[in-house]
Image (tube, helix red, strand yellow):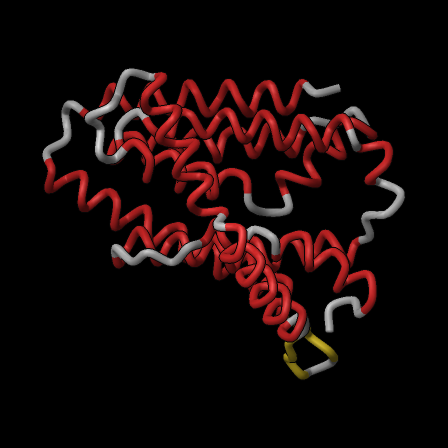
Amino acid sequence: MGIGTLVNTGAVILGGFIGYLGQRFLTDRLQTTIMQAIGVAVIFIGISGSLSHMLVLKGQQLSTQGVMMATISLALGALIGEAINIEGRFVKIGAWLRQRAGRGNDSKFIDGFVIASLTTCIGAMAIIGPLQDALGHDPTMLFTKAILDAVIVALYTSSFGIGPIFSALPIFILQGLVTLLAVFIDDYLTTAMTNGISLVGSMMIFCIGINLLLDRKIKVANMLPALVIVIFYAALWPMS
């Protein structure tokens, strides 16, 4: 139990260092192009994840579900996140890690850490994977996630520098906690809840892609409470 999270954490560190070592061979122009390419990829990851839970084929008619759930969860989540300033807390953690890593003059460190942490920790795989690892002794989903995260973080470090490597820390903490609490969570986590987490998480990943591609500053971290709100919403009104 827990081997999936350990492998995921190690893969992120390894992928990050590979990307960081390759950074020296990339010009600023190439780094900008790579970042735009990552932004496009992340946008489509978010779109595909969202649509996979929103679009439903009923007979010959294509309809949608979960729109109201996602809207309310994101709106309330953003309200709560803005009130407690989660984004600012992420930045403070990033600043502390930057100092501890001796990278005080690295202007991209914090952005790289925050973006990589959000990309790798948001989504159903970060929740369902540890549950399967703990309860079914099946780390397959986390092994798959480890490969994806390693590639993503390698690309991030090639543009942001060493900062994204430290996303291994929130991955280890989040997935480790889910693994330890799996026995208690599993009895209450329904399919509707996990689908809701995946839907809202995919929409947040889309926002990360917008930030990367268009150099915007959507405060995705402040939307994180939406992942909790959607669980309660799905318990009362599944996929409405």
The image position of residue 198, as x and y in percent, is: 63, 53
Residue 82 relative to residue 151: left or right: right
Residue visible at 65% across and 75% down in the picture: 68
Quarter of the image where the N terminus is located: top right
Q: Which residue lies furthest to the right in this view?
A: 187
> Closer to the camera, 29 or 72?
72
Q: Quadrant for residue 88, please give it.
A: top left
The image position of residue 159, as x and y in percent, is: 24, 35
Residue visible at 40% across and 35% down in the picture: 92
The image position of residue 170, as x and y in percent, is: 53, 30
> Closer to the camera, 102 or 44?
102
Q: Is residue 45 visible?
A: no
Quarter of the image where the C terminus is located: bottom right
Does 216 sit above or below residue 10?
A: below
Residue visible at 79% across and 24% down in the picture: 137
Q: How many marks?
A: 0
Residue 232 relative to residue 170: left or right: right
Q: Which residue lies furthest to the front in this view?
A: 83
Q: Can residue 134 be seen in this view?
A: yes
Q: Which residue lies furthest to the bottom in this view?
A: 61
Does 152 sit above or below residue 79?
A: above
Residue visible at 74% across and 56% down in the picture: 231
> Closer to the camera, 95 or 231?
95
> Closer to the camera, 57 or 109?
109
The image position of residue 153, as x and y in percent, is: 39, 32
